[in-house]
Image: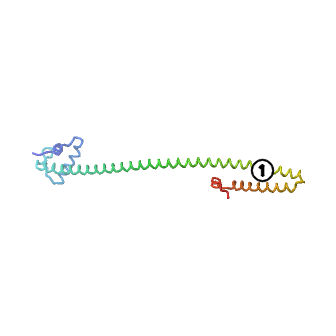
Amino acid sequence: MGKTVREIAEMMGTSSDGLIKEKQRIRDEIKRQNIKVSKQGNKFLIDDSDVERIIGVLRSKTREENSKKNEEKEELLQKIKELQAQNDKLREDNQNKIEEANQISSKKDEEIRRLNKKIEKYADDFKELNDKQMQLNNQQQQLQAQILEQTKQLKDSQQKLLDSAEKSSQLQDKVDKMENASLWQRITRKFE
């Protein structure tokens, strides 16, 4: 008695979905082993001893294929785990860098606020010096008027005028230095 290709596939426990593929594998194995088939009616039959050989070889190949697939799956799972670990590490590093950047930004913002307050104070000081300069200019004009009115006291007035002019020049130098000073000089108040 013999078995058909379909019967061999069913003996191997093949599902109806995989039947066509399994039948092709059986036919390929029959050709590979040069197994003789007999024909009864319109069916091709394979001898029972050959059936056992075919099933043995195909089951062995299936085990090998499954083993290889399992190894590949294990390798892929291992790679996935490694990539997840790397991803977690990168995420943690990224979070640390964000926190570090936020801290640096916070410190810089605080420093900018502090420097802006200093600049505002220097601006107020400059305005005050400017007001004093205007007052000195007014005083100088008054002194000149007094000089015209009091020609008798020319020497005293001239001396006062020279003193005032010297003070005015010093203040003007300071104002000029402040006006031409860099931001750093204004902050440190070193105008020389």
Q: Position of residue 188 (x, y in %)?
A: 63, 54
Identify the residue at image location x=73%, y=56%.
173
**Left or right of 18 in this view: 188:** right
Which type of secondary structure does the marked residue at label 1 adopt? helix
**Left or right of 75 in this view: 117:** right
Q: Position of residue 76 (x, y in %)?
A: 31, 50
Identify the residue at image location x=21%, y=51%.
64
Which residue reaches farthest top? 16
How many marks the image carries: the answer is 1
Return the residue at label 1.
Answer: 136
Q: Amino acid at mark 1?
A: Leu
Quadrant where the C terminus sits is bottom right
For label 1, count other residues whose C-alpha is less than 10 Å away and answer few (under 14), some (14-19) or many (20+).
Answer: some
Which residue reaches farthest right? 152
**Left or right of 51 in this view: 69:** right
Q: Position of residue 5 (x, y in %)?
A: 17, 46
Which residue reaches farthest left? 1
